[in-house]
Image: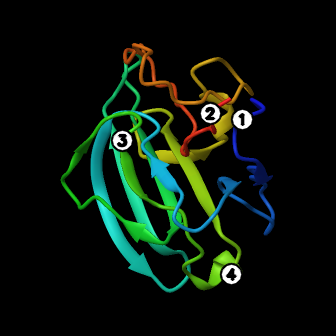
């Protein structure tokens, strides 16, 4: 983790049993900006009792022909609507504690679903897709020209100035 990146309080866990956590939980304060991890199109923006305010972004197939979907849950507020095109680093919401599954703890639950084979998408560990490599959380930098031919992500929240 970069020293200036907000902490991850819970990691991705996918098992064949009942214990599953299909994303990572990023700690923060209510109202902190939540940003798109890669360019894409908002395919859902709604609220539900379990996860509260939620945004889903579908990312076009990359050079490998596979697409991805990123999901942002427990938002205090959604700043995008279905159909919006978003850029990497664009603010899409505010970190919050909405939905009963937030436990009242301010955080962002972030999921990444990746296409495998020709069918739909499957929950994937976000740590496999950082721009800087597997397990290397990558803070968004507006001065960097990111390679969009491969699906790689930056952190879903801004890192603090160092």
Q: Where residue 115 appears, x then y in whole percent?
A: 46, 37
Relative vertical location of residue 111 with respect to residue 159 in this rendering, above or below: below
Q: Quadrant of residue 22?
A: bottom right
Instruction: Give 137 or 95, whichever is nearer the viewer.
Output: 95
Q: Which residue is mark 1?
A: 4
Residue sitting at x 66%, y 18%: 133
Q: Earlier in the sequence, mark 1 or mark 3?
A: 1
Q: Residues within 10 Å of mark 4 (few under 14, many from 20)?
A: few
Q: Which mark is residue 90?
A: 3
Q: Where the C terminus falls, by quadrant?
A: top right
Verify CB contact (< 8 Å) between mark 1 and mark 2: yes
Looking at the image, residue 6 sits to the left or right of residue 118; the answer is right
Mark-to-mark CA distance, 4 and 2: 27 Å
Q: Which mark is residue 161?
A: 2
Q: Residues within 10 Å of mark 3 (few under 14, many from 20)?
A: some
Q: Where residue 130 appears, x then y in whole percent?
A: 61, 27
Q: Which residue is mark 4?
A: 104
Instruction: Give 4 or 101, whichever is nearer the viewer.
Output: 4
Q: Which mark is residue 53?
A: none
Q: Where residue 28 appears, x then y in whole percent?
A: 66, 58
Q: Note whether residue 35 is visible.
A: yes
């Amino acid at each position: 983790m970069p020293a200036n990146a907000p902490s991850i309080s819970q990691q991705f866990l996918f098992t064949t049993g009942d214990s599953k956590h299909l994303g990572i939980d990023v700690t923060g304060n209510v109202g902190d900006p939540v940003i798109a991890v890669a360019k894409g199109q908002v395919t859902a923006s709604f609220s539900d009792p379990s996860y509260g305010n939620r945004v889903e972004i579908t990312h076009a197939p990359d050079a490998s022909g596979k697409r991805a979907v990123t999901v942002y849950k427990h938002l205090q507020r959604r700043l995008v609507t279905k159909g919006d095109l978003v850029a990497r680093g664009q603010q899409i919401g505010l970190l919050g504690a909405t939905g009963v599954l937030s436990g009242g703890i301010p955080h962002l639950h972030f999921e990444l679903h990746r296409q495998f084979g020709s069918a739909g998408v499957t929950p994937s560990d976000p740590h496999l897709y950082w721009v800087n490599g597997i397990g290397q959380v990558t803070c968004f930098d507006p001065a960097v020209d990111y390679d969009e031919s491969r699906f790689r992500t930056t952190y879903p929240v801004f890192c603090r100035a160092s």
